Amino acid sequence: MKVLISGGGTGGHIYPALAVAMQLKEKYDADILFLGSDDGLETQLVPAAGLRLVTVKAGKLQRYVSWGTIKKAARVPVGMMQAIGIVRRFHPDVAFTSGGYVAVPAGLGARLSGVPLLMHQQDVPPNLSNKLLMRLASHISVAFADSLRFFPSQKTSLVGNPIRQEILDVRSKTPQEARTALGFDPAVPLLLVTGGSQGARHLNQVVCKALPELLNHCQVLQISGKKLFEETRSLSDEILKGSSEEVRKRYHLVPYMSEEMPLALQAAELVVCRAGASTLSELAVLGKPSILVPLPPGIGASPQEANAAMFGRQGAAEVVINDQFTVEALLERTNRLFTEQSALQVMAEAVSKLSLPDATATIADKIAQMAHVSGVTTAKNEVLSI
């Protein structure tokens, strides 16, 4: 079974695609080719996972016009032709896209070549890329029930978001064991702060300014983002220069985490983060309470605000709009949640109810079924009911 997989730009699109790829290799001995953008994080993560990667020029589609958007849009037809050529050389039996603007040339290239396409929708509302692909997709899988209304019911299934096996495996450790493995004091609660693979300047600044009080009742692991690391380190050093060594030892700043990220999530009592779909799905699987600060909308709607609102309605997280995320807002919530352990427990139970931990296997099985329908006959490829 030959499978073309595409998802790129940020870790939120790449990690779910990698999870599906590894499941397909392990369960079906599939031949995987990963199609990514030539300037995305997948250029690092996919080879590191031991998978073949080919890249195309991909441009982000926008609903407004500027010189920058024109240049990005000009990459789309180039990437389309590249993707069609790749599909015809690789001859996949089925294609899977997990989002990101590279999904457009990958998905269209597959369908124009007669290859069945499983399109995955991660966020609650579909972005422009998936709106373009949805009519062509052979089947659509969605992560959240709130997304079902956007797609044709006859070809759409609620399955959840694919989760990295490392995230599933880390559930065998207690938070205390995870903190010990990362070099933290296992007896002191840990606050994890992350702005995603690219970082978030506003989150970094607010958390740094709150450090003198935060560190009185918890440890802090802050993931700044590679490009924001130096400025965040300078700010935190300035804020903590009058603090004791004992207090400073409770604070750890890193630019980025990949292999240790599952441990960091499991170690945390509370997470402050954006509201990307992959992050929320990992929080749900691990049962982690969170303070969500969704990425604010630019021009057009922000899918993160819809994602966060859905978690907020379920009592699975506390939601703070970006403009209202201040030192005072952060400290009010952290002080209350760390003091009232029952509140954290209620939130943990609520977020766990949103977990669909079998999503990776379900999607892999559906891909295998679609490949069989398209003519593949291998010993490991049986017809499955999804």
Image (spheres, rainbow, N blue to C red):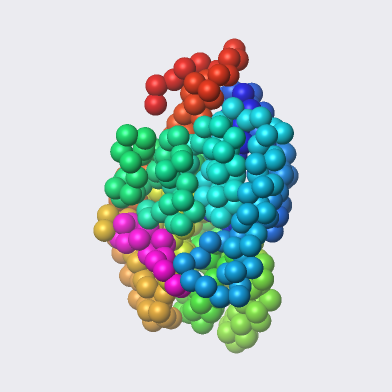
Residue 302 location, x and y as percent? 41, 65
Dominant secondary structure of the residues highlighted in magenta in the image? helix
For the magenta stretch, what is the residue range? 298-312
Is residue 69 one of those drawn in magenta? no
Asked if the magenta segment contains residue 311, the reply would be: yes
Report the quarter where the N terminus lies.
top right
- Residue under the point 62% across and 86% down: 238
Q: How many marks?
A: 0
- Can the viewer see residue 100? yes
Residue 244's spot in the image, x, y percent? 60, 80
At 59% from the left and 27% from the top, the residue drawn is 93
Image point (72%, 44%), residue name: 54
Question: Residue 40: x and y, percent?
Answer: 66, 57
Image quadrant occupied by the C terminus = top left
> In terms of image quadrants, where is residue 228?
bottom right
Residue 153 figure quarter: top left
Relative placement, left or right, of 227 versus 336 is right
Q: In the image, 52: left or right of 77?
A: right
Viewer-side residue, 46 vs 65: 65
